[in-house]
Amino acid sequence: MAKEKINQELMEKIVSLCKRRGFVFPGSEIYGGLQGFYDYGPLGVEMKNNLKKLWWNWMTKEHENIVGIDGAIITNPKVWEASGHVKNFVDPLVECKKCHHRFKADDITGDKCSECDGLLTEPKIFNILVPSKLGVVEGEKVDAYLRGEACQTIYLDYKNVLDSTRIKIPFGICQIGKAFRNEVTPGNFLFRQREFEQWDLQWFCRPDEMEKWFEFWKEERMNWYKSIFTNPKNLGFYKHEKLAHYAKKAFDIEYIASPVGKEMEGIHWRGDWDLSRHSEFSGQDLSYADLETNEKFIPNIVETSGGVDRTFLFLMLDAYTEEEERIVLKLKPSLAPYKVAVFPLLKNKPELVAKAKEIYSDLKKEFTVIFDERGNIGKRYYSQDEIGTPFCITVDFDTLKDEAVTVRDRDTMKQERIKIKGLNSYINGKL
Ligand code: ATP
């Protein structure tokens, strides 16, 4: 089968699994949906929260000198003038004169439409900031923007962070937050949305240490992604040839096996560009006073800016596995929405159901657990495999005598007999 067709089929399978099992729903679907907007369902929100928690703990607990913020989505509109977004956050767009399909000019090689072979228009410029209005009186409303990238609030809070903590250079400020873009070509499920979430680290350092820190964060971030993907070999770097005027280099971390776009996170050399611009536009001194060396300078910045939703999509694609008799989502257990499923062997035996419920309630205090008594054991296993639950526990008649249960492993499908009182430590050990 042609690669394109395989890719398209894989995406369709993921989109359908996400909806059917409650990972991701199309936004406002009962009204016909809204392109580029999605909602995370009961399983999706568990997985996304697991993912964000892993990122946050890795940033703030496994590294020295990184603190977090949670900035507002709407800022003073001057921010977007200073950042250059009002003037430069534009996408040149071409439209097919025949079928009116729109394409990003950057993605087009010839002058013919790839959908219908029609002729394309000259590129037109579109600003992709999402505008908003503040105020209640018509005619007196003030123009504002939903933030086009989450990182700007970090620059705005940099001085407050310095003044309110004892942090010293080099240090980082991290944030997970929503960003909004009027994308010219929203689509490909979670890959290109108009509302999405970013995780950013801005690492503030001495200008003469940029090279060292850029290389450090580039490798560090790649290692983190490798630790959460089922198949780390599917990750790679893309080196940018076209650079922003303040950047010495730029790399993307890519999910190279992606059937749609590949970029997951950008590692950017921002130098002193952002703080200098905000200093200029706000009239505030944003320099850093180094008390040890008696120097004053604008810190330089290495940025790591990634997409939570794109990572989510790539993780799903990477974990999705079709085996002879089952579909299994081989997610890392730390990411799986449910860690454990508990079943009574037979649903019409009250003593088994009661014992299974007891175990379920106990485990629930520590893990995300699901209880299932529908259908037969085989069907329940396959249903859990499809959502990536790493462990299934079955309570049978022997349990009532020996206080032990059968634990079945998602990936190997091997079963082990484990004492009930040892279940928490057994699961924790595996996680
Ligand atoms: P692209 O070239 O794909 O438009 P970008 O280079 O503009 O992305 P950045 O501004 O560097 O992206 O944003 C950082 C990260 O935010 C990206 O690597 C991506 O993971 C995520 N991201 C950007 N735009 C979107 C979007 N429309 N939908 C979902 N995630 C996005």
Image (cartoon, grey):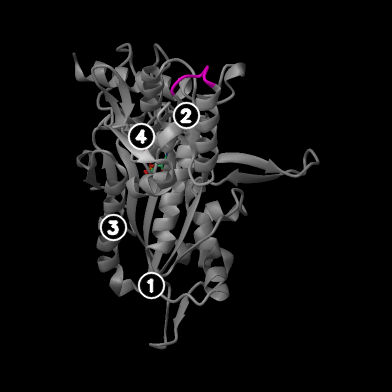
Kindly report which numbered mark, 3 or 4, lies closer to the viewer in this rendering.
4
CA–CA distance in space, label 1 to label 2: 39 Å
Kindly report which numbered mark, 1 or 2, lies closer to the viewer in this rendering.
2
Residue in view at x 27 percent, y 41 percent = 254
Q: Secondary structure at mark 3?
A: helix
Earlier-in-chain disc, 1 versus 4: 1
Q: Which residue is mark 3?
A: 220
Residue 408 lies, in percent from the top left, at 33, 32
User: Badge 1: few (under 14), some or many (20 or more) residues near its Cα, within 10 Å?
Assistant: some
Q: Secondary structure at mark 2?
A: loop
Residue 208 lies, in percent from the top left, at 29, 74
CA–CA distance in space, label 2 to label 4: 25 Å
Kindly report which numbered mark, 2 or 4, lies closer to the viewer in this rendering.
4
Q: Amino acid at mark 3?
A: Glu
Earlier-in-chain disc, 1 versus 2: 2
Which SS does the magenta portion mostly show? loop
Earlier-in-chain disc, 3 versus 1: 1
CA–CA distance in space, label 3 to label 4: 36 Å
User: Badge 3: few (under 14), some or many (20 or more) residues near its Cα, within 10 Å?
Assistant: few
CB at disc 4 and ligand 1 closer than 8 Å: no
User: Badge 4: few (under 14), some or many (20 or more) residues near its Cα, within 10 Å?
Assistant: many
Q: Which residue is mark 4?
A: 407
Residue 405 sits in which quadrant?
top left
